Amino acid sequence: MSDTEIIEIAMQTMVVALKLSAPILVTSLVIGFVISLFQSMTQIQEFTLSFVPKVVGVGIALLISGNWMLHTLVNFTEQLYSQIPALLG
């Protein structure tokens, strides 16, 4: 197993992690920005106001993209396991 193969697997792992976390993080970011904009326009400075919409938004994002996320993770794991004999030999 060479350094190049290890770096390639590490890069693939980081890309998959970025793909899997993107829907949740982007949803939370957009909802947080909208709530923050609303709070600044209405001058309501309640810190807990953004919590419930973020939880609901992240839950909906998981329902919508969960199937894709699961298939992406399973495909990556199968690909990684299929590479094991070539990496050891």
Image (cartoon, rainbow, N blue to C red):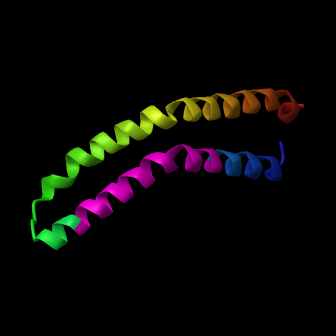
Query: From the image, which quarter does the C terminus lie in?
Result: top right
* 34 to 27, vertically: above or below: below
- Mark count: 0
Q: Position of residue 43 (x, y in %)?
A: 10, 71
Q: Position of residue 60 (x, y in %)?
A: 38, 37
For the point 58% across and 47% down, the residue is 19
For the point 56% across and 35% down, the residue is 69
Q: Looking at the image, which is closer to me, 64 or 9?
A: 64
Q: Position of residue 85 (x, y in %)?
A: 85, 27
For the point 84% across and 48% down, the residue is 2
* 83 to 39, vertically: above or below: above
Query: From the image, which quarter does the N terminus lie in?
Result: top right
For the point 36% across and 42% down, the residue is 58
- Magenta-highlighted stretch: main secondary structure? helix
* Residue 32: in magenta span: yes
Magenta span covers which residues?
Answer: 14-37
**Horizontal arrangement in the rendering, residue 64 relative to residue 44 (left or right):** right
**Horizontal arrangement in the rendering, residue 4 relative to residue 9 (left or right):** right
* Residue 54: in magenta span: no
**Horizontal arrangement in the rendering, residue 80 relative to residue 57 (left or right):** right
Q: Position of residue 10 (x, y in %)?
A: 68, 48
